[in-house]
Amino acid sequence: MFKKDKRMAELSPAAVEAFLSEADDTPIVMLNLINFEPDGGRERYGRYHQMAKPILARFGAQILFGGDGLPVLTAGPAAGWDAAVLVQYPNRSAFKNMIADPEYQEAFKVGISAIADIALQPMKHMSGLI
């Protein structure tokens, strides 16, 4: 699923299965780290988001943050990302059901045309941090 070509990371079936097999009783925030295609990718990604927003709402998800990447401040091999988006889902099942939704699959065709590379990192609340 979501496979575009060899440059783009595809969802790992084993990682998705492990993610979905854990307790489904807390919100999950999905960190999306994105590099856009140089030929209008940022604009196509904007169109994807306009299409995806009502679908996200239907599954109880909401965009918490979206921002353009700035230069990386740490030493090392990190090249940085064009953008980052944080999307909160009410639970793991909401994410699973959304990505399986036919309307979302159509919207994501626009999104995938915009993306040169992407990393998806699900996160859960860290106790005691805030």
Image: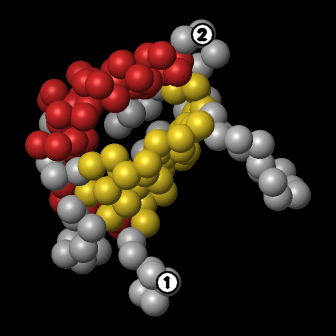
Q: How would you rate the neighbour count of disc 2 (Cα within 10 Å): few for under 14, some for 14-19, many for 20 or more?
A: few
- What percent of the width, then of the height, locates residue 80? 71, 43
Compared with 103, 128 (above or below) is below
Determine the image quadrant of residue 81. top right
Residue highlighted by disc 2: 39
Report the residue at 44% width, 16% height from top. 44
Quarter in which the C terminus is drawn: bottom left
Along the horizontal axis of the image, is 78 left or right of 123?
Answer: right
Label placed on residue 129: 1
Q: What amino acid type should be assigned to the residue bearing mark 2?
A: Asp
Compared with 106, 65 (above or below) is below
- What percent of the width, then of the height, locates residue 34? 55, 37
Along the horizontal axis of the image, is 68 left or right of 125?
Answer: right
Q: Residue furthest left?
A: 58
Q: Callout 1: helix, strand or loop?
A: loop
As rendered, which of 74 and 37 lies closer to the eye?
74
Q: What amino acid type should be assigned to the residue bearing mark 1?
A: Leu
